[in-house]
Amino acid sequence: MKKIGIITLNGYFNYGNRLQNFALQESLKKYNFEVETVWIEKDRINNKAKSNKLQTVVKNPKSLIKKVYTKAYLNPLNEKRKFRFKQFSNQFINETTTSISEANLPTDLLNEYDYFVTGSDQVWNPYFTNASSLYFLTFAPREKRIAYSPSFGISEIPTWCESEFKEWLKGMEHISVREDAGAEIIRNLTGREAEVLADPTLLLSKESWLSIAKPFSNKPKESYLLTYFLGEIPVDTKILINDISNKYNLKVVNLAQVKQRKYYLTDPAEFLDFINSATLFFTDSFHGSVFSLLFETPFVITNRKGSIPSMNSRIQTLLSKYGLEDRHISKIKDTDIFNVDFTYVETILNDERSKANEYLAKALSK
């Protein structure tokens, strides 16, 4: 059987990362390929990327002290969380037992796979990948390079890696991205037109996702308001969440807040069930938004707070695509907070899935 190697962000730390990896794997298997995720060993941090990260931290020394303290406090808890994420991956994702790096590319790597697919997730975010060429598949012949819905995660490429990105993007045989801002970046750098395709998590049906979902052992029996924030929760959002929980008698479940230790250990399969069963969901996460759409769970979106340049364009593209711009917190009214019009979501999903299938069928046809 022919074989595809997925190149994506590896690790056992983020729900969206694990679930998009699973979804891309399952989507590619439909074309009668054996699919394997190639594990990438982290090289030493690119000096340019490292210096750019440090510059943002030094501006706020109090933030640095807080991060160091929090990291030490969280270490045992994060190890438990990582273990649970790894258990999910072992059960659902076919990963290589060996790893590659820019300095270590096995000679038989190219012969082992018929195609390499880079995506989805923020594989083209230079702050996440240290601007590594591996995520642009430069180690493989051009005809084996396929990009499926990768994200830059930022609105513009920093000057310190612009020339490299331009060269690597030109070398991609089949190119697509996840958001409109990414297509614009590619157009400006290379003159190429990249298709904007759905994140792979959207390619699987609600029923497919629920088939691997499971309830958390300490899941509340009463109705609950769920939150999942990757950035700091804005003060006004905290106030709104508190007001709504009190007004509608909803227990607040925070999936990424250490103060609720037991929920912090939720694994990706339990994450799916939490969203599906929530009365209301607040998030700044792209994949949190995706599963709200798929499960038709009332949700509220906030902008991500953080030091890395804006990462909100992918959520804006998603909301615009499905006509749900009114789910942004800036447009939410208390009287409408539980009322979401999902009427046209399934029709749009079917169109997006057809578009994605057409792209993959063409890319994998040789």
Image: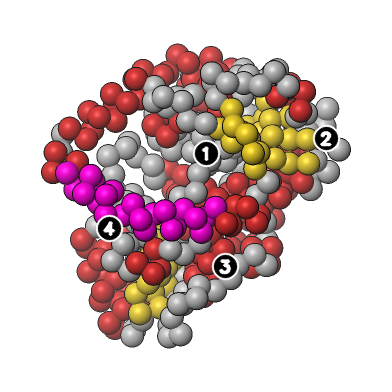
Q: How is the image coloured?
A: secondary structure
Residue placed furthest toward the right = 1
Q: Nearer the viewer, mark 4 or mark 2?
A: 2
* Residues under numbered marks 1 and 3 in contact, where contact means CB atoms less than 8 Å apart: no
The quarter in which the C terminus is drawn is top right
Mark closest to the chain's N terminus, 4 or 2: 2
Residue at the spot of label 4: 233
Question: What is the three-letter code of the residue carrying label 4?
Answer: Ile
Q: Nearer the viewer, residue 326 or 22?
A: 22
* Residues under numbered marks 4 and 1 in contact, where contact means CB atoms less than 8 Å apart: no
Q: Nearer the viewer, residue 220 or 317?
A: 220
The numbered mark at residue 2 is: 2
Question: What is the three-letter code of the residue carrying label 2?
Answer: Lys
The local secondary structure at tag 1 comes to: loop
Residue at the spot of label 1: 9
Find the distance from the CA under tag 2 to the CA under tag 1.
Answer: 23 Å
Mark 4 crowd level (few <14, some 14–19, many ≥20, 10 Å Cα): some
Question: In this figure, what is the number of numbered marks?
Answer: 4
Find the distance from the CA under tag 2 to the CA under tag 3.
Answer: 34 Å
In this rendering, is residue 71 above or below 151?
below
Question: Taking the image as drawn, is residue 151 in sight?
Answer: no
Mark closest to the chain's N terminus, 3 or 4: 4
Question: What is the three-letter code of the residue carrying label 1?
Answer: Leu
**Residue at point 58%, 21% (across, down):** 104
Residue at the spot of label 3: 295
The local secondary structure at tag 3 comes to: helix
**Residue at point 26%, 70% (across, down):** 240
Question: Is 189 inside the magenta-drawn segment?
Answer: no
Question: Residue 6's x, y, as percent?
Answer: 65, 36
